[in-house]
Each structure stands twice: as C-alpha cells, then as structure tokens.
Amino acid sequence: MYNLTANNGFKASYTEEKLSDGITLIRLSAKNDKPDKLELRLEWKTPDIGVNVCYSPMGYTRRHIRPDWGGYVSSCAMSSAPVYSNIGYDDTNRMTLGCSDAKNRVSFRSSVVEETAELVNTVQINVDCAVSDYYAELRIDTRPLPFYKCVEEVSKWWETFDGYEPAEVPETARSPLYSAWYSFHQQIDIPKIVEECRFFAELGCKSIIVDDGWQTDDNSRGYAYCGDWEPTPVKVPDMKAFVDAVHETGMKFVLWYSVPFVGRYSRAYERFKDKFLEGEWNNTFTLDPRYPEVREYLIGLYRQAVLDWGLDGFKLDFIDSFRQSTTVKDGMDYVSVYDAVDRLMKDVMSELKKLNPDILIEFRQSYMGPLMRSFGNMIRSADCPNDSFSNRLNTLSLRMTSGNTAVHSDMVMWNYDEPVEEAAYQLTNVLFSVPQISVLHDRMPESHAKMVKSYLTFWEKYREVLLDGEMLYKNYAADFVYVSSRKGETQVGAVYSGRIAYIEQPTDEIVLVNASPEREVIIDSAPAGKYSYTVCDCMGEEVGRGECELGSLVMIPAPVNGRVTLVRK
C-alpha cells in the first residue's frame, strides 16, 4: 500500500499499526553508515471521493485540491506545523495527516490523478544537514469527524513527544493587550504611550508591547541598526523609568526584539561578522545560532533587560529568518540550525523563568508550531493591518493547532472616520482570540470609545468560554460562516455570514454576535424550550428584548456587530 523511498544511500523502512478504527500510525526510519542529508518520501493512493477542500496551518487561504503536478505545503521548526487535512464541504474529515517531526522540513501533498480520479498522498521529509539515523511517526486519521477535531487531536499528540511540551501560560497572556505598533510605529513617544496605558488599563488591558524603534533613531523600518539592543537616548533616555511609568498604570511591559538580525551599523556586526548565516538583506545579517557565543550573547541580552529594566516579557520577532545551512565551521557545537534554535530558545525561556516565572514570550504566525509552543506562551496572528477578515482566518486557524497556548489577534486598528458599526468588525472578527488593541484613544470619536469599552467588557466576562470552551467551526470552505465556543451551560457564537447561528447543543445561556452586514440572526437549534433575550448594539446599548422558543428556525433582529443574549426560562 505504501511506497517508501530515501536518497543518498539511506536504507528506509516502515511499520504500520492500527491504533483504533480509523487511526493508523506509520513508524518511519532511515539509516546510513555515512552521514548525509536525507530525503524520505512516503506515497500511497486513495479514492478521490468527497474531498472538496484541504487545510494546513498556513495554507487555509489556498484550500483547493492540487493536481498531481501541483506543489506541496511545508513546515519546519520555525514555520507552520506538520499537519494536513482533506475535507468535505460539510467540514467532515476525509483524511488528516500529522507528522511527529516538527523540526525538519515536512511537506504534504494530496493530489489528483486526472486519469483515475484518485489522490496520490505524499509525505516528504527533508533533513538538510548530515545525519546517519532518523526516526519519525506519521499519524493517519480517516474518521468521519469534523476535521478540526482531528487537527486538535494531532496538536495534543505532538505534546506527548519529548521537547514539545508546551510552555506554561501566565494569566496575563490571556488578557487583552495594548500594542504601540500601529499607533506609534517607530515614533516612540513615552508620555503619550503611558497615557494610552492609563486609558486602556481601565478597559481591561493588562500589558503593553512597545515595538520596534526604541533601539534606533532611524525610522525607515529597516534593521541595519539592530544587534546592540540599547535604547536610543533620543527616544528613550531612561528605559527603567519608562518601564516603571507603565507599571504604575497597572500594566505589564513587553519589549520587542528582532532575535536573529544584526545590522551593519551596530557594534555587534564587528563582533559577529564571521558568525552569520548565508545572505544579506538591506545591510542586515542573520546570526548563526550554532555558535555557543551567539546563543550566550542573545540570552544575556534578554536576561540583563529583565534585571536592569524590570521587563515582564519579550516580543521575539523574525525567528523564521533562521534558515537551515549545510555549511559547518570550527567553533560550532551544532550541525543543524534548527537544533541550535531549539537549544537557544529553550535556554532563553529557562533563564528568564528563573527571574520571573510568569515571563511573557510572544511569537507571530507563522512561527507557531509545536516546537515554538515549547518556549513561547503567546502566538499572534500574522500582520494584517485594518484587515478584519484575515485576522479572523488567522486566529481561527491558530486556535486549531495551539492547544492552551494563548492565541492573540493581530493588533486591531481602523480609520477613525469609519462608522462605528464598521470599526467594530475589527474586534468581532477576533472574538475567539485574545484581542490586541492599537488605536489612539484621543483620536477615537466617542462612539468608537464606547464600542471598544463595551467589547472588552463583554470579552472579559466570557473569556473562559471563548478561550477554553469546545469549539464549533461551521463551513470552513466558505471562510467559516458561524463559529462558537461552549463551556458548561454557556456558549458564545459569532455569525459571520448567512444569518444562521447553528446551536447544536443548546445551553442555559446563548450569546450570539452578529458579525455580519445583515440585520438579523436566524437561530437553527434543536428543541430547547423557551428563552428570553435582549439585544444590544455594538456600543453595548440595549435596543430590543423579547421571548422565543428554540426548536424551529427563530429570527431575531440584531444590529450589525450587535449581540443577542438568550437565557433559558
């Protein structure tokens, strides 16, 4: 059934075990007397029946089924995660593949053979540094469950492997956050930032991320001055005083660092110029973590920042710029760049937790797989400024693979002249993630300020349901028309299109967010008895109330981005 091949003289073999009805485990191994790079490829065919779209952690915007001359979706240590699903239009899993190797490059393809209407399923593993012995496991799940439940099970499966145990998540990581990036970019203005902290702390934000710009007078958004990581006196004359001022507002202080980058105009460039990975971009170079002195330097920077300035966390950026290299030089203690990054980041987390057990570490999509979760406790959506639609897809996909790691939205922003109902999309589309806010409070009209306050109050009230409940994703092929989370006798759902809220298991309290341009919500529910309901607009003001009985289609008028709260009588 399976065809396994390997290159460069490796002897490859596999064993197959039926774990349960619908789940098969393939154990892959390869050996070579002479260490070399390895390409291991497993192929098999299945009927192309009922497969309409596919899912991968960074391929959810390109869901089409590929022809057999099409490309792959790939993951590696610092990009995406090794899981792939074939799915029907009704969200039913046809086949979900998960690989235990989240460090090396794993590529998936399930492609159509035109002559036979079959699928050729391919899993290709590339170890791009010399090895002599290799082992990995492939989990094949063909159970007819909602596909996202199969993906979530793969995520739990990863956690059972050594080195992939998720980092602990401090409570602050699960609370709304203010980001200075879209509000200030590199124009660091300490008094104004502290003023924003005071305002948003009162609305429930527990921390701030001060982003790029604190370390340089150059505001061109390049990285040619990175590497020394010292505050520029022009913008930040006293970093400790800055941190203290933020702490006085009641918020934690998280500071941005670009981990791998060293600019030509830094002192660090002269120190490490013979310890860079290949390539240069705009006078910026990438450190090679296989040198122990490189790792020691970076760990020392972060450790000293906590000791000297009192930082509560770090936004560690651009880790995906660490690329595998076949060049090995004297002074390196690792052959694999990926192994060295793993060592670097686990040591960073270990050292920082000695200073602060609740240290916050934020990473960004696409460096969000099981390896990254072992040394990061906040994973944010990829950048999508003023793009609520992408923020929705990004955060929902992250939820499927992130377990209990705190999934954050990209920093929400909008045009201050936008109608408040339109601005509210930026928040209702990230309902099932921790919201990051990046607007200026004194630029917002009063209606926008009321909307933000209402939303954050609502989100905090239902936080445990939204972050910890059992998720329901409806119609992945159409960008999720309805999503909900249920915990105990409360559920919160969001209607994104199509008007319909699908209540598969009625609870005593049901909250529905009308995150669509329609002005009504249609409830499709199993019989559940009588409910009273209230309706509020996006600013939290009540605009209606009534009673209904669930069990047949029920239509309730609801404003754009308003909420309907139903309570069983």
Image: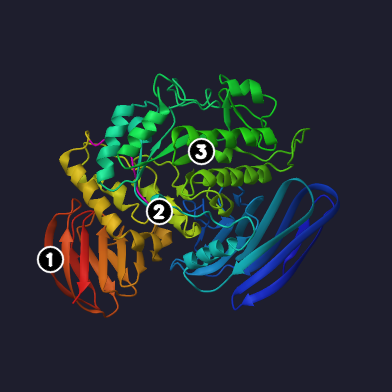
Q: How many marks?
A: 3
The residue at which mark 2 appears reads as 171
Name the amino acid, label 3. Asp
Position of 109 relative to 336 (above/below): below
Main SS of residues in magenta? loop
* Residue sitting at x 34%, y 46%: 206
Q: Label 3, on which residue?
A: 317
Q: Is residue 28 above or below residue 58?
A: below
Looking at marks 1 and 3 on the same chain, the residue that comes earlier in the sequence is marked by: 3
Tag 2: Cα neighbours inside 10 Å, few (<14), some, or many (≥20)?
few
Q: Is residue 289 above or below residue 227?
A: below
**Residue 203 spot, x, y in % from top left:** 25, 46
Give the distance between the C-alpha atoms of the residues marked 2 and 3, in whole angstroms: 22 Å
Q: Is residue 350 visible?
A: yes
**First in residue order: circle 2 vs circle 3:** 2
Residue at figure coordinates x 53%, y 36% from the top left: 302
Secondary element at tag 3: strand
Where does residue 18 sit, x and y in percent of width and height? 66, 76
Magenta segment boundaries in residue numbering: 434-441
Inspect the image, locate mark 2, and give the three-letter code of the amino acid beneath it.
Answer: Glu
